[in-house]
């Protein structure tokens, strides 16, 4: 009997496609003129809460300026601000976000090549976030580059001025700190836009000579910091960077993004397949993995315990107005853990017996520990966002959406391997539903989220169908070829497994069922309980373990994976043996 899942009724309902905002004709020249200062001040407060990674605004001086003389604030800056914040505000006087974005684009295109200014640089940073959330990564990349070079020019001018007139530095301390913060926001943004892609980073953390941001307290009160942290100070060997509190949140999250983006790039290169190297080679995957893990552990060590979730609750930081920033710091950490141990578990799509051998030799972390790290990271991602939601401080940004997108696939894997998932299949299903609901809600705010929501819906159907057909895999009838990669934020590009791996798979598929286990046993010569694996008494493997290992190669699947929903399960995946 042919199993078909091509019926339209089986498809999950999709949220309505976000309709492109169209600017209103009446405000095409200057959509800011008709807005009262109270609305713009409310937008500043929204920005402070919703976009903590771009916390470069000096609110005391900005709000004072808006209150006394709104016309003195560059309308391009205000338009860029509203392009991000209007979606979260209920003021009926506000136009669609695209109205403000279009005005900002037009003005930036005309003025970007004139004399640089702090307002223009910050406007470029904000319009970058807008384009990114709208699903236009190339435009975002270009605006980000313009912002980076403009702020570098402004910093050089400021540094030259301080050298020539050091006595004037204290008077301009607040403005200089805004330059510094905007520079590091550009750095974090560069990391986010580079996530997993093959582009070279525009900036390198270790080589930067710009001081790190001061504490929020010193910044807001306009005080000269007693000491300035430099990038080289972000080490456990430096006493200056110990026990960093949320007051240094921008510094913490910036360094975190630097580590995260390199972990993600490493994981994606690992998935594509690399040239074999000796374990002692500095470029060896083992050595690189260990170095990244040490950097991540050091970064976490530098944070005060009050910054670490779940040791500290999200509600405590919501009470202080830092809930969203607290979430970002921990999302970056758990996403780094997730991709680091995912790479360790999958290890370039190696056969399972090679994989377990590598895991034992790598930092003494076995397979069960890697799985535990993955599950706990996914649960903490959902946990911290849920805690902020119920506390009235929800985080709805593209990065949080990406985090939930990946965590949802972990939940799906938990439904395939419930005996390993903390809380079992009930908790895995509950957390999966919560994450799917979050992505549906996010897609109403950010167009880029619509693709993530649709992908997890289709992937969820795939996992459920594959789970229901595990018996066919246990009979030795097939091998799921699931592969893929994440190349950049919001962009999914699929690749097939390496040629040699594909050939091994094809050879195994063409081999008689009775010979498959024997062939593996001869090749490895080990455990009769689990042919094809090295003996590992400490790591119990279920009879459906092959399916589980391959299902963990989420969240991006070989380009043919979704064909089964239209052509029938056995047509798209004949190796599963579910045909007539």
Image (cartoon, rainbow, N blue to C red):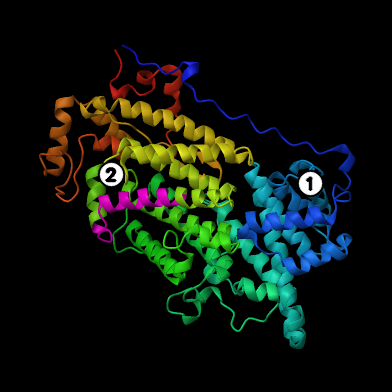
Q: Is residue 565 above or below residue 284?
A: above
- Judging from the image, what secondary structure is the residue with disc 1 in? helix
Q: Is residue 330 above or below residue 488?
A: below
Can residue 117 be seen at all in this image of the molecule? no
Q: Which residues are magenta?
A: 361-381
Rendering coords of residue 249 (x, y %):
56, 66
**Image point 68% across, 46% down: which residue?**
88
Examine the residues drawn in magenta and state their main secondary structure: helix
As drawn, the label of residue 415 is: none
Say whether residue 529 is left or right of residue 162.
left
Q: Residue reaching furthest bottom?
A: 167
As drawn, the label of residue 100 is: 1
Q: Disc 2 designates what residue? A: 420
| Rendered image quadrant of residue 360 | bottom left
Rendering coords of residue 279 (x, y %):
29, 60
Q: 495 or 565, which lies in front?
A: 565
Whole-angstrom CA distance, mark 1 to mark 2, is 49 Å
Residue 371 lies in the magenta stretch: yes
Q: Is residue 138 above or below residue 318?
A: above
Q: 236 or 249, which lies in front?
A: 249
**Image point 69% across, 62% down: which residue?**
149
């Amino acid at each position: 009997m042919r199993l078909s899942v091509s019926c339209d009724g089986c498809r999950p309902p999709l949220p309505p496609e976000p309709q492109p905002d169209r600017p209103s004709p009446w405000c095409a020249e200057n959509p800011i003129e008709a807005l009262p200062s109270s609305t713009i001040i409310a937008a500043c407060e929204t920005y402070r809460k919703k976009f903590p990674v771009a916390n470069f605004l000096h609110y005391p001086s900005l709000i004072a300026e808006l209150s006394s003389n709104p016309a003195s604030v560059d309308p391009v800056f205000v338009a860029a601000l509203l392009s991000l914040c209007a979606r979260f505000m209920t003021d009926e006087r506000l136009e669609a976000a695209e109205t403000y974005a279009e005005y900002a684009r037009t003005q930036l295109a005309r003025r970007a090549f004139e004399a640089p200014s702090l307002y223009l640089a910050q406007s470029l940073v904000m319009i970058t976030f807008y384009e990114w959330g709208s699903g236009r990564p190339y435009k975002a990349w270009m605006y980000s580059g313009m912002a980076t070079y403009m702020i570098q020019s402004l910093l050089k001018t400021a540094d030259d001025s301080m050298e020539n007139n050091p006595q004037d530095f204290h008077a301009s301390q607040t403005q200089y700190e805004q330059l510094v913060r905007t520079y590091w926001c550009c750095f974090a943004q560069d990391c986010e836009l580079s996530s997993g892609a093959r582009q070279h980073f525009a900036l390198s953390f270790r080589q930067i000579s710009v001081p790190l941001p001061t504490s929020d307290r010193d910044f807001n009160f306009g005080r000269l910091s007693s000491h300035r942290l430099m990038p080289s100070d972000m080490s456990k060997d430096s006493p200056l960077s110990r026990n960093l509190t949320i007051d240094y949140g921008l510094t913490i999250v910036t360094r975190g993004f630097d580590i995260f983006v390199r972990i993600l790039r490493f994981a994606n290169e690992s998935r594509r397949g690399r040239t074999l190297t000796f374990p002692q080679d500095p470029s060896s995957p083992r050595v690189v993995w260990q170095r990244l893990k040490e950097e991540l552990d050091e970064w976490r060590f530098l944070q005060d315990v009050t910054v670490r979730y779940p040791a500290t609750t999200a509600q405590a930081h919501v009470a202080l107005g830092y809930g969203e920033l607290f979430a970002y710091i921990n999302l970056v950490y758990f996403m780094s853990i997730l991709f680091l141990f995912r790479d360790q578990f999958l290890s370039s799509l190696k056969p399972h017996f090679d994989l377990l051998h590598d895991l034992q030799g790598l930092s003494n972390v076995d397979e069960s520990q890697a799985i535990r790290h993955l599950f706990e990271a996914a649960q903490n991602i959902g946990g911290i966002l849920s805690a902020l939601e119920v506390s009235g401080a929800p985080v709805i940004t593209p990065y949080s959406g990406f985090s939930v997108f990946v965590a949802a696939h972990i939940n799906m894997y938990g439904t395939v391997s419930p005996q390993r998932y903390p809380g079992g299949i009930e908790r895995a299903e509950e957390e999966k539903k919560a994450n799917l609901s979050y992505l549906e809600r996010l897609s109403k705010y950010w167009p880029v989220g619509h693709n993530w929501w649709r992908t997890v819906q289709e992937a969820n159907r795939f996992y459920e169908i594959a789970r229901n057909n595990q018996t066919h895999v246990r009979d030795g009838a097939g091998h799921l070829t699931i592969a893929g990669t994440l190349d950049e934020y919001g962009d999914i590009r699929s690749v097939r497994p390496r040629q040699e791996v594909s050939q091994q798979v094809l050879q195994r598929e063409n081999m008689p069922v009775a010979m498959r286990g024997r062939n593996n046993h001869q090749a490895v010569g080990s455990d009769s309980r689990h042919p094809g694996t090295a003996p590992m008494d400490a790591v119990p493997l279920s009879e459906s373990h092959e399916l589980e290992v391959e299902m963990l190669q989420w969240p991006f699947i070989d380009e043919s994976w979704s064909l089964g929903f239209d052509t029938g399960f056995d047509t798209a995946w004949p190796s599963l043996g579910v045909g007539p």
